[in-house]
Image (cartoon, grey):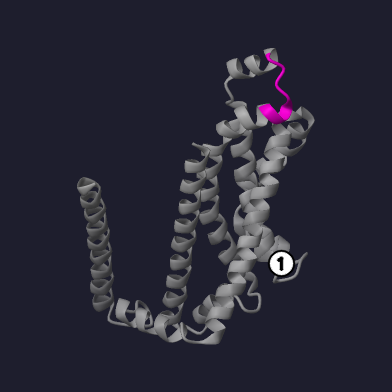
Amino acid sequence: MEQTKQKKLKKLLCGVLTLAFWIAVWQLAAIAVGREVILPAPFAVCRRFAALAVTVPFWRATLFSLLRIMGGYAAGVLVGTLLGTAMHFFAPVRVLFSPFLTVVKSTPVASFILIAYFIITDTVIPIFITFLMVLPMMAACVLSALSSTDPMLLEMAKVYHFSFGKKLRALYIPTVLPQFLSQALTALGFGWKAGVAAEVLCTPRDSIGKYLYEAKTYLETVDTFAYTLLIVLISLALEKLLRTLTCRVRGGAA
């Protein structure tokens, strides 16, 4: 018990020292540049962030960005899981959708954002882009995990006449779950960045991306850094939340 506490304390101390090191590097770089419009100091960014954090537009933009991007993420995880499952069990589905998934994974995010800009409304684009980026990641993950199911166990299930539901619970879910949870965490970070990038390019109303774009346009560098800090903090918070949920799911599955 004491060793566990010491390890946690050591890890926390290491994290604090690492953060302090990079903040110091940032501060020295800001001093060397000497122009806030090019590179603001950490204190100036934190002060501006605190000022923005007490305004209603700041929180409204945060809320709507979260709703849009997390909605696209949830849809991408759900549809990707279903598609990956269908591709495993039905060869025609795999043949039909494999080229589509390859194209989506190979095409730059900016290209899809620009194409979507001419087809759908600004507020829907971040949802669609996040969905489109998460979908192939989850589909490929589920397909790969299902394909790696132990053939000996499948043969045993066939001998003992397991129903599909029983095979699903006893074989497929335990095989897929670890890879699925790991990929879902990776897809979350990727989807969040893609969704914010979509907001920056299409500037929907009440969005972090819109304020980030305006800050860049009017050379409000401190605001640009402050909104970037917000994006990073939300990403870390979402990752921490999903990691916690993942640990609980794995613990329950065990």
Please provide the residue range marked out in magenta: 160-166
Give left or right: position of 234 versus 157.
left
163 falls in the magenta region:
yes
Residue drawn where x is 51% and y is 85% of the image: 218
Give left or right: position of 235 versus 31.
right
Amino acid at the residue labelled 1 = Val
Q: Which of 157 and 148 is in front in this view?
A: 157
Classify mark 1: helix, strand or loop. loop
202 falls in the magenta region:
no
Mark 1 surroundings within 10 Å by alpha-carbon count, few (fewer than 14), some (14 through 19), many (20 or more): some
Residue tagged 1? 124
Q: Visible in this render: residue 124?
A: yes
On the image, the x and y values in percent for residue 203 come to 63, 75
Residue drawn where x is 53% and y is 81% of the image: 58
Q: Which of 77 and 247 is in front in this view?
A: 247
On the image, the x and y values in percent for residue 197 come to 57, 65
Q: In this view, does 122 lie above or below 105?
A: below
Residue 139 quadrant: top right
Residue drawn where x is 47% and y is 42% of the image: 251
Q: In this view, does 244 lie above or below 233?
A: above
Residue drawn where x is 50% and y is 78% of the image: 216
